[in-house]
Amino acid sequence: MKIFSLIWCMFLTTLIVAQEKASINSPDGKLEVTVEVENGKPFYSVIYNKKTMLGKSPLGLVTNEGDFTSAIKWLASSKGTTSSEYTLEKIKQSQVSYKANTLNVSFSNAKEQEIAMYFQVSDNDIAFRYQLPKWGDTRACVVEKELTGYNFPAGSTSFLSPMMQSMGGFARTAPSYESGYSADAQLESNTSETGYVFPSLFKIGENGWVLLSETGVSSLYTASHLSSFKDGIYSVAYPDPAQNNGFGSTGAQIGLPGYTPWRTITVGETLKPVVETTIPYDAVDQLYEPSQDYKYGKGTWSWIVWQDNSMNYEDQVKYIDLAAAMDFEYILIDAWWDERIGYEKMEELIDYAKSKGVDVFLWYNSNGVANDAFMTPLNKMNTSIARKKEMKWLKKVGVKGLKVDFFGGDKQETMKLYENILSDANDYGLMVIFHGATLPRGWEKMYPNFVGSEAVLASEMLIFSQDVRNKEAFYASMHPFSRNAVASMEFGGILLNKYLNKGNKEGQERLTTDAFQLATGVLFQNPVQMFALTPNNLEDVPEFELDFLKELPTTWDETVFIDGYPGKFSVLARRHDQSWYVAGVNAEKSVKKLKLELPMLAGKTVTLFSDDKTKETYFKEIKIPSSGKVSVDIQPNGGFVIKN
């Protein structure tokens, strides 16, 4: 009898454990996510091709209405599928077909309040979020903390960018996602008190790669980042209370039923899935209809090299003429235009640009209350009344877009400001670029008039910092695998001055070659690119380089990973219509000799733009063998582009 009872108890225990665990696989069967409850706590784990990518990692939320991190009971699970087909011209791939298997798991806490976890698992991507129902008469709550964690196997290394210190930096405008990256760092060395920005890249020993991010952040939630490494785990971290000058909750106020943004995990044995992922857009929906068809393209802007002193009517005419000569669609007129040119003269300038076939973007300071940024126009974008009045004028005079600067923070208060600017701008037919800003999180699809954000250590720091100039190639080799893998990136590059100032004779010497600069025009993806050319480049840059930039697209139908290693070198191929561009840069100190497989160019005669040992850029026609295999040498701080 005792033996029978023991066996029966063992059976019951096994049954209970089995009922508190569920797994879901990707359509191709290689990617597996397991969710379970152990000792009253929820966990998940990730396996790819029978190799552990994430060990048992914590889940859970803390709200002001209930704690969903302990005393958790498994209620039920169900599986399904989801799929979508969509067209989105302004991301790395214009036509997307998404298929995923789904898992929905429901739990209850000690107060018998329910919560659910919903997972979508495609062949190389996981998207999951928490779903909160109504609890009795409770129709609202504040999510105060999230325990979602990432438990990487021993021996993993990281490629991370630290979150900037709140209310630091220029005029207390940080954090603005403008820190550099470290490469192949041991997890134990990731001790930044401020944590690390998304996206976050990890090498899982010999198993492969993992890219972490989030998507679907709107006015309904706060944006998050990655914590520092603690007790073997990284966790999702909500904003520092000091952001936004200490104003606003660090959590999220949501109505019930409601849900969190999507946590995304991209996995692969190589970097190909990381570079080619579309999960930031697969998991989200468009929030409103575009008020018109928006036109993407290239532009000039004087501020990047000629700086504040160029904000006068005469210099802007020179940059309009430069845009016209280069067949660019736009000019961006930056800070101080309202004071130094004025509204009345600006209307004349806009008319002049139109006569040259060039349209205008105007810069605005987002600030009115959150930091000390003082550049004007000020107090035009931070309130609804002022914003709509300004946008009515912008539409009347024919401005096509805005660049809005100096946000600094990820609280829900700031997410509301981003969304309000975008929504109002769409009503007036205006595109929007954000600068001094957070990472876009699915915004290219969610907001039809959103055309990119900086959110990177961008071209302006090449002007201001010798250290950034020294590391330009290093950072450029990182971006396709990290920042630009999950969102459009308005870098503001293609610097062809030898010295990064108006005189172009001495001072801030550029250390990369012209071929490197041309390559970044392909490597860095954004549907509207404001390039850092100067009027003198029409005379002092070889004509074939200018011709290349005149023809360079800013939208792509396909993006393919070719080769690379973050921090060392990167090679990508992008297709626009029938034209392929294959581009690469080298961040190492010796010549990079590569044997590339380019099946899309097999048997074709193409143009190679590259540089020699003297850093001189050249071009020549070459024939790609029918095998599609070709050898390419990339000089240190150099680059190449192959174009058919």
Image: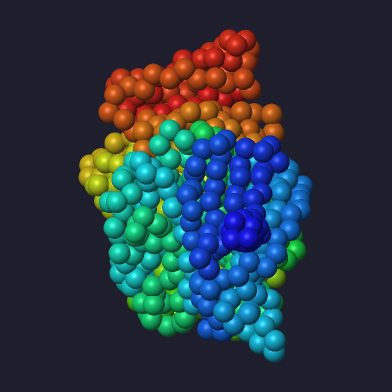
In terms of depth relative to the viewer, which is nearer, 163 or 544?
163
- Is residue 207 visible in the rendered image? The answer is yes
Q: Is residue 621 left or right of residue 601?
A: left
Q: Quadrant of residue 32?
A: top right
At 39% from the left and 73% from the top, the residue drawn is 240
Q: Quadrant of the N terminus?
A: bottom right
At 72% from the left and 66% from the top, the residue drawn is 288
Q: Quadrant of the C terminus?
A: top right
Give the residue at the far front of this rendering.
Answer: 1
Does residue 42 lie above or below 113 as drawn?
Answer: above
Does residue 108 lie above or below 203 as drawn?
Answer: below
Does residue 542 lie above or below 374 as drawn?
Answer: above
Q: Is residue 540 left or right of residue 465?
A: right
Query: Can you give x and y, in whole percent of width and height, for residue 413 in the image?
Result: 51, 78
Query: Can you give x and y, in whole percent of width and height, for residue 238 in the image?
Result: 45, 70
At 37% from the left and 44% from the top, the residue drawn is 154
Query: Can you give x and y, in whole percent of width and height, for residue 34 in the image?
Result: 59, 51
